[in-house]
C-alpha cells in the first residue's frame, strides 16, 4: 500500500502547487473577503484553489470521495462511509492570507480507516512544499530545490519549543495545559505550518485548544506522522477522522516524539 501511495503523491503535489498559483494570482490583487454562515472569511482565492483541486482529485481517483471545505460549506458532503476519502482545505489560514503574512497553505490529505496516510501542505507565498506518506517518510522542498528528508527530533535538554496558533487561542492556556513541562520557547505560526514545524524538528509540540475542522489538520497530520510524529486528543486517545457529520475536531496535541 505504501508504494501505491508514493506513486500517487507526485500528482497531489502538482495539484497543491497549481492551487497555490491560483491563490497567488488573487493575493497580488486588491481582493476582498466575504463572511460564510459560520462567520469565517472566504475569498476568491479559496474558491479558485478548490475549483482546481476537487475535480482533479475526482478524476485521479474516481472511487474515492472528496470532502472539500468550500463545497462542504455549501452543503455538498459526500458519503465517506466507504473508509477512504480525500480532505481538502484549498486555503488554510485565510486570516493569515488577509494579513498578507505568507503563513497560509494548501492542504490535501488522503484518509484511510479514519487516519491520514498521505498529505501535501504547500505554502505558496514561500514556495515551500511539505509532503509525505505514512510509513514512507516526509520531505520538504523550497522553490525549485530538491526535496530534503525531514524528521521529528528528540526534545532538547533546554526544553520544549512550543508552536501555537497566530490567530486563535491563548498562549497562556497552552502553557497551563503543558503543566510542569520545561519550555524553552513559545512561537506563534499560522495555518497547518505548525504541524510542519514539528515535522521538520523546528518545534516539539503543537497543542490546539480551540475549534478546528478535519480539513484544517489532515494534511499536516499526515506529514507529521510520515516524519515520525503523532497527533492525539488531549487525553492521549488517538485522533481519528470522520468523527461526526460536520467534520469538527476536539482539542488535540501534535507531538514530535
Image: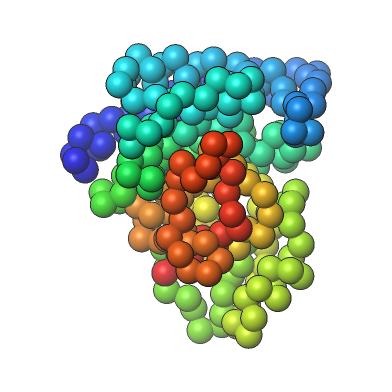
Quarter-wise, where is residue 147 in the image? top left
Which residue lies at the image location 35% right of the left edge and 14% below the top edge? Answer: 59
Q: In this view, does 74 lie to the left or right of 98?
A: left
Which quarter of the rendering shows the C terminus? bottom left
Can residue 98 be seen in this snapshot? no
* Number of numbered discs on residues: 0
Q: Is residue 11 above or below residue 250?
A: above
Which residue lies at the image location 49% right of the left edge and 45% below the top edge? Answer: 243
Q: In this view, does 70 lie to the left or right of 230?
A: right
Which residue lies at the image location 38% right of the left edge and 47% below the top edge? Answer: 115
Q: In this view, does 205 lie to the left or right of 93?
A: left
Q: In this view, does 97 lie above or below 132?
A: above
Picture coordinates of residue 29, whole percent (x, y) = 75, 18
Which residue lies at the image location 21% right of the left edge and 43% below the top edge? Answer: 2
Picture coordinates of residue 166, whole percent (x, y) = 72, 52
Q: Is residue 99 left or right of residue 180?
A: right
Picture coordinates of residue 5, whole percent (x, y) = 26, 36
Picture coordinates of residue 211, whole percent (x, y) = 67, 49
Quarter-wise, where is residue 94 in the image? top right
Which quarter of the rendering shows the N terminus? top left
Q: Is residue 89 above or below residue 23?
A: below
Amino acid at each position: 500500500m505504501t508504494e501505491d501511495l508514493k506513486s500517487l503523491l507526485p500528482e497531489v503535489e502538482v495539484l497543491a502547487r497549481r492551487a497555490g498559483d491560483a491563490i497567488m494570482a488573487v493575493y497580488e490583487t486588491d481582493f476582498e473577503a466575504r463572511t460564510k454562515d459560520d462567520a469565517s472569511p472566504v475569498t476568491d482565492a479559496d474558491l479558485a484553489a478548490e475549483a482546481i483541486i476537487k475535480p482533479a482529485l475526482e478524476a485521479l481517483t474516481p472511487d474515492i470521495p472528496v470532502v472539500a471545505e468550500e463545497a462542504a460549506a455549501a452543503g455538498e458532503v459526500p458519503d465517506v462511509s466507504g473508509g477512504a476519502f480525500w480532505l481538502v482545505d484549498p486555503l488554510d489560514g485565510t486570516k493569515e492570507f488577509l494579513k498578507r503574512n505568507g503563513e497560509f497553505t494548501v492542504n490535501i490529505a488522503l484518509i484511510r480507516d479514519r487516519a491520514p496516510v498521505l498529505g501535501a501542505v504547500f505554502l505558496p507565498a514561500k514556495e515551500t512544499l511539505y509532503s509525505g506518506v505514512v510509513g514512507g517518510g516526509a520531505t520538504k522542498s523550497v522553490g525549485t530545490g530538491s526535496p530534503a528528508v525531514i524528521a521529528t527530533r528528540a526534545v532538547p535538554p533546554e526544553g520544549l519549543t512550543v508552536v501555537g496558533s497566530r490567530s486563535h487561542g491563548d498562549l497562556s492556556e497552552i502553557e497551563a495545559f503543558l503543566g510542569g513541562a520545561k519550555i524553552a520557547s513559545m512561537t506563534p505560526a499560522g495555518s497547518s505550518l505548525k504541524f510542519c514545524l514539528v515535522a521538520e524538528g523546528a518545534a516539539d509540540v503543537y497543542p490546539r485548544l480551540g475549534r478546528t475542522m478535519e480539513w484544517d489538520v489532515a494534511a499536516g497530520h499526515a506529514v507529521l506522522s510520515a516524519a515520525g510524529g503523532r497527533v492525539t486528543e488531549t487525553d492521549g486517545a488517538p485522533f481519528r477522522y470522520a468523527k461526526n457529520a460536520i467534520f469538527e475536531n476536539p482539542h488535540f496535541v501534535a507531538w514530535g516524539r
